[in-house]
Image (spheres, rainbow, N blue to C red):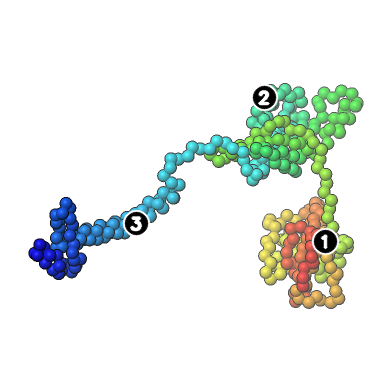
Amino acid sequence: MTSQRKRRHSPARPHDGFAPPQDVEAYEDGAVYGSDETAAVADVSRLTLASRLVRGLLWTLIITSPLLALAAFAQASNGGSSPAAKPAPAKAASSSDGSGAAGFAELFVTAYTAAGRGQESSLVPYYPAAKQLRLTTDPGTVRADQATTVGMRQGPHGAWSITVAVRLETTPAAKSRGKGRAERDEEDAQPALRYFQVPVQAATQKAGSRAYVALALPSEVAAPKQAKTPALAYGQMAPASDQDPRVQTARSFLASYLAGQGDLSRYLSPRTRLSPVTPAPYEAVEVEEFAADRQMGEGPPPDGVRMRLLIQATATRGEQATPLQYALTLTSRAGRWEVTSLDPAPAFATTPNPTS
């Protein structure tokens, strides 16, 4: 008993820098399981092993992190490691395909109006049911020209309603009988502008290409109503005077622009860039009338004043004279007028006047 009590209260010896706690004893069924030194050595071993495991784990993360990052980047670039998706079936084309449907309708109307007896197969690429048609018009009786789209309306499921204007010329029938029939043939021979409406289905194919098919034969419809002309910003047209500096600038500019007479840059504002029409389509240009959006004051204008003009001109080449109109913006500089822009359209009356 005395020896056990002394050992229990004697100070423990340090081991590798660790001081194990005193009075460490484990009991199982009343017997001593380990001594103070044994417990300290076990603690040190466990700490050393844990430290090695932590260091090994850290080095593993440091080494494998770049590899994991590269693998993730490659997976993202390839769209993931999932199996390749099956190609999507044909679906209705988006609203941006209206131009393609319009072109298809124009070709269909041209072929349809010109087709005659025995030429039904020429319509099948546009309208598959056309193989059941039986045309009775003599081939070559109608000639179609200048087909163009004048209206588009999108429907559901990729369908489009396209209105096509086409100029038709009918040749007189070879076997006209009677005075009335001959007069009617002569009237029909005059070129006429006709309008047809075509329902077109647009679809997107598996490869991403577009496909079109007509849902019915063209339907002849009335001509679209003419839009009302808006009020323009210019005053009344007036005869062009050779003494007007604005007319002088406009005439010289158009003669250089259309007829290749002189250096075009001489008539342009410093920061304006325009190229002449080449080859020159005309030999001479004359300004007949013009209208301005403001009155010109007395004497040379100060620098920076802007004025918009609507020019009525006549361009000639040989014996042929062509009327033309141009909307120009002039700017004053150093006591003369220069062309600042060749405007895309006449200015509306609601458009504010350009500031000085």
Disc 3 versus disc 2: distance between alpha carbons? Answer: 68 Å
Q: Which mark is residue 131?
A: 2
Find residue 79 and report its horizontal and vertical position in percent: 45, 47
Q: The C terminus appears in which quarter of the rendering?
A: bottom right
On the question of residue 41 being in view, the answer is: no
Mark 3 Cα within 10 Å, few/some/many (few <14, many 20+)? few
Question: Which numbered mark, 3 or 2, is in the foreground of this view?
Answer: 3
Among numbered discs 3 and 1, the one appearing first in the sequence: 3
* Residue at left offset 84%, top offset 53%: 229
- What amino acid is found at the position of numbered circle 1 in the picture? Ala
Among numbered discs 2 and 1, the one appearing first in the sequence: 2
- What amino acid is found at the position of numbered circle 2 in the picture? Lys
Q: Residue furthest front?
A: 1
Q: Which residue is mark 3?
A: 65
Q: Which mark is residue 349?
A: 1
* Residue at left offset 21%, top offset 58%: 46
Find residue 84 and report its horizontal and vertical position in percent: 45, 40
